[in-house]
Image (spheres, coloured by chain):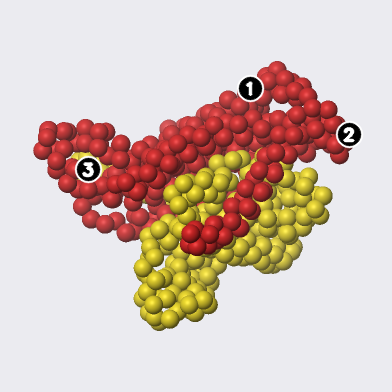
Chain colours: A yellow, B red
Amino acid sequence: MTRSLRGIIILVSCLIVGGPLVLLLVLSMAKGLAFPKLLPSHMTLDGYRYLLIQYPRMVHVIINSIKLSTIVASLSVLLGILAGRGLHGLSVRGRTIAKAILVLPLLIPIVSVAMGLHIVFIKLNFANKMIGVIIVQLVVTLPYAILIFSDLFHYLGDKWFEQGELYGAVGLKKFRYVTFPLLSNGIISAFSISFIISFSQYFVTLLIGGGRIKTFATEMFPFINGDPLIASSFSMIFLGINMLMFLCIEVFVKSFVKKGIVVGEG
Amino acid sequence: MKKQTKAILYTMPAVIFIAGTILLGTFLAILQSFGYFPEINLTKLTLKYYQELFKSPTLVKSLVYSFKTAIISTLLGVGCGLVASYAIVTGPKEHKFIKRMMALPVAIPHIIVVTIVFNLLIRTGFISRLLIGIGLLSSFQDFPNLLLTSSGIGVIVVYFWKAFPYTMMVLYSVLKSIDKRYNYVSRNLGATRLQFFFYVVLPLAKPMLITSALILFAFSFSAYEVPYLLGAIVPKALPVQAYIEYTSPILENRPYAMAINVLMMIITFFLMGVYQFVSTRVERRRYYD
């Protein structure tokens, strides 16, 4: 590949990825963007102000959404660590079978599975409730967490755990001083990915939540192909909340891992 | 033996949870698609919903529409992702900033991408204004209607924008791990740069390439949000059509919804077989190399 061609490809890729994001940011603050104009006449924070202050029940929806997605992401991390550890210890045959099952949600239409499950959820009294939405969102997020942890355990091998045991770290101590620090980066990425996937679920939340469980995504959805100012402000707030949560989980996890070296990249 | 038991015990909760929900959901969808729906006194198994489904011309159009948007966005995304990640890997220096930027779209959900693409491609949107600004068009009426039409361009653009950086990220580590000496050896044996790419790089990247293409296709084929917001009124994408039938006040329509769901599942099941075939080969390589 010649140098100039490589430069052009990289430049175009960056434009394709970065351009739309800049546009979103500009749109969320643009005032006076009448039709043929390319640039707004001046900037405004009206969109944010409207959504964060005037929009009814916004605070409630945001808190509710964060609560729901935190539960889903935590469960996802917990089951993900267990499964990742388990997969590492299984025989090649067992691992192949288990992995085939665990990646099913990535390949089977969740829309269809959710419609099939809906009637059971109604009978079990899970429908229109937090618990039902948590279960169905967990199905979507769990495979990502498992893939992260199974790769991480594969990469770490047994040596660190064996060494820890040798020095007397057993049981809970082993988890606190060996396993948790080694997994901290994986926990941060798995939590973040699970959180944002859960936070952006519209269809399954609407179906199983029956419109009763209001999340940021279900609240935002009707505005998406409407007024650009509101739609893009909604999007920016969405991203802002998620960035904030990524930061929180990073600080939270790292606060338990003060001393020692952390091995392994999430 | 003890280690094995422990490993099985650790894996079980996730396996039971995923197998339980997915299999139960699938099983019930299949049952209802055959007309078994005791809640409204339908208990006789019948094939009539499938027969009527395949007789209806709208369904065939929906199937073609969903398939078209999914396959085009996947192939474009995977193709561009491969070329771009190859360009970055073969570059002289580490592009930390570019790498980080390419990771961004993975964290941006589809509904936000829809917001952006909507404002880009609508007839009075950014691209139309840009073309008018540089004098290529005189009014927005000259700009083609790209959204909400059967061309599916809006939907394709959204999935492409997610698929392209995703493939790039996934392939980056694969291409990075290719031994540099392969390049010298092949060039020394007389291969051109293009031949090196097609006969050395491509075969090494193939398993990962196919795996990501399958995941991307399965998602874009069966997700509801994007075609609902940007897709055509007629024909509707399969998941959208299924949900419309599902929420119909006439409960007897529900088996139709489930028949559409089963159709989507069969297509992705078929793909899963391919995925399994490919991924076991990847796994084997990991252990025998």
Please indicate whether residue B50 sits to the left or right of residue B117 in the image.
right
x and y, in percent, of residue A117 in the image: 72, 45
Residue A4's label in the rendered image is: 3
Q: Residue at x 89, y 34 (%)?
A: B41
Residue A73's label in the rendered image is: none
Q: What kind of element bears circle 2?
A: loop
Asked whether the beta carbons under mark 2 and mark 3 sit within 8 Å of each other, the answer is no
**Which chain contains the residue that carries disc 2?**
B
User: Which quadrant of the structure image shows residue B35?
Assistant: top right
Earlier sequence position, callout 2 versus callout 1 = 2
**Which chain contains the residue that carries disc 1?**
B
Q: Is residue B107 above or below residue B73?
A: below
Q: CA distance from mark 2 to mark 1?
A: 30 Å
Q: What kind of element bears circle 3?
A: helix
Q: Residue at x 39, y 71 (%)?
A: A162
Q: Residues within 10 Å of mark 3 (few under 14, many from 20)?
A: few
Q: Residue furthest front?
A: B1
Q: Nearer the viewer, mark 2 or mark 3?
A: 2
Q: Residues within 10 Å of mark 2 (few under 14, many from 20)?
A: few
Is residue A200 in view from this perspective?
no
**Which chain contains the residue that carries disc 3?**
A
Q: CA distance from mark 2 to mark 3?
A: 69 Å
Nearer-the-camera pick, B280 or A27: B280
Q: What kind of element bears circle 1?
A: helix
x and y, in percent, of residue B101 in the image: 39, 55
Question: Which residue lies under the disc numbered 1?
Answer: B60
Q: Nearer the viewer, mark 2 or mark 1?
A: 2
Question: Which residue lies under the disc numbered 2?
Answer: B41
Disc 3 marks which amino acid?
Ser
